[in-house]
Amino acid sequence: MSFFSLKNGVLHAENVALTTLAAEYGTPAYVYSRAALTAALKEFQDVLGAHPAGAGALVCYAVKANSNLAVLNVFARMGAGFDIVSGGELQRVLAAGADPKKVVFSGVGKTAAEMKQALAAGIFCFNVESAPELERLNQVAGECGQKAPVSFRVNPNVDPKTHPYISTGLKEAKFGVAYEQALALYRRAAALPNIAVTGIDCHIGSQLLDPSPFVEALDRILALVDQLTVEGIQLHHIDIGGGLGIKYQAEQEQPTVASYLNPLLDKLAGRGLQIVMEPGRRLVGNAGLLLTQIEFLKEGEGKNFAIIDAAMNDLMRPALYEAWHDINPVAPRDGASRDYDVVGPVCESGDFLGQARPLNVQPGDLLAVMSAGAYGMAMASNYNTRPRAVELMVDGDTVHVIRQRESVEQLYAGEAVLPA
Ligand code: LLP
């Protein structure tokens, strides 16, 4: 079910017309549906609740996908945990009402200060990604008089068959520890005074539409768990990472959460391991869109451009990954369409949100760039001194401003000119 649909010829977010939102809050605007966020998390919770191995499982939303406090708070209220990758994200989730005991800390470059911050908060686990990180964590935990709970992010060397920039589980990747080195690292960790070995994790990549690499990865990880058991290293949890894909085109199919999770849960049944997962995109991607207005239509030589008021700084994915986002008129017109490159005002040829899109549009029309809830606002920048967009969350008939539009003054507030 989509929470963005046409009613009386106008695209709505739940019960609110996008034309109303544009008139009231301006464009560009990120628009989220609370019901869509809730439904996405509930799909995970329902599958877990229906499987015997799912009891006690922890869904840790990967904050990087969309870190707005309201989004985090909606998930926290539903009992979710969080997967963070920085001290900043830790501060955010705590501000949004997260339970620190449900927070896992991933990332290859944790600083000593971030480790201290996470130890003080009392997080669930550090997902450690290298030998030097383990040594640093042991030292920092010792200084804090604590034992740090540790899981190693193990690289199962499985090809997720996704875009190379978002594949992370191959052995060339900077992420995780090599499968072959994992055993030695666990032995070392078990011997360190300020480390408590609690788990194992892996994350092989993002936007996977075929769930079979997840099964392959889990098989590899479970073989390691068995080896560890033989050595007397008993784990408490297994974190299967994130990466489940979403459909970016209306006519595309996406795997259900059940088709992704159930085969994994079947393998995990009876092992006595708490199951943790780190979905990001799947929980927020199709719960948000980017609302933008056409400034000009420009006829080029053999190409037409729809120049909009959103740009690559608002949504980087097309420029960065050649990612596809459906672009829909908010109030579709009858009649013939022509092909447009939908481009922003930023001074880069890569500044497009879509290319050769058949549209029947006029200047001033509103467009909705779909599936923009994940890695949209979270990756937005101020390039070209463009203030970042307002973020709105629709809940039934109600609209909440969950982040105000930035002002230009805010952009240079921290800057200073040289003394006279
Ligand atoms: N866990 C770890 C350790 C991760 O690195 C990531 C994403 C996730 C979980 C969540 O993955 P998801 O469920 O969202 O696929 N900016 C790119 C995606 C980068 C993903 C980075 N890591 C994009 O816009 O496609």
Image (cartoon, rainbow, N blue to C red):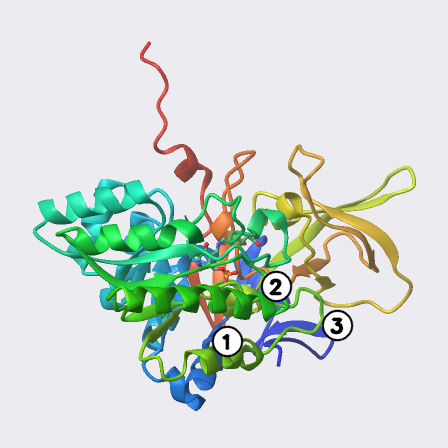
**Res. 40 mark:** 1
Q: CA distance from mark 2 to mark 3?
A: 13 Å
Which image quarter is the C terminus in? top left
Q: Locate residue 6: give its quadrant.
A: bottom right
Q: Which residue is mark 2?
A: 371
Instruction: Characterize the local packing of mark 3: few (<14), some (14-19) or many (20 or more) Cα atoms within 10 angstroms.
Output: few
Give the mark nearest the N terminus, 2 or 1: 1
**Residue closer to the observer: 356 or 182:** 182
**Farthest residue toward the left?**
145
Q: CA distance from mark 1 to mark 3?
A: 19 Å
Q: Which residue is mark 3?
A: 251
Give the mark nearest the N terminus, 2 or 3: 3
- On the question of residue 280 being in view, the answer is yes
Residue type highlighted by circle 1: Ala
Q: Does 128 appear above or below 237? A: above
SS type, badge 1? helix
Tell me residue 407's x, y (percent): 45, 42
Tell me residue 273's x, y (percent): 32, 76
SS type, badge 2? loop
Residue type highlighted by circle 2: Ser
Residue type highlighted by circle 3: Glu
Q: Residue at x 59, y 54 (%)?
A: 27
Q: In the figure, is residue 232 to the left or right of 203?
A: left
Q: CA distance from mark 2 to mark 1?
A: 13 Å
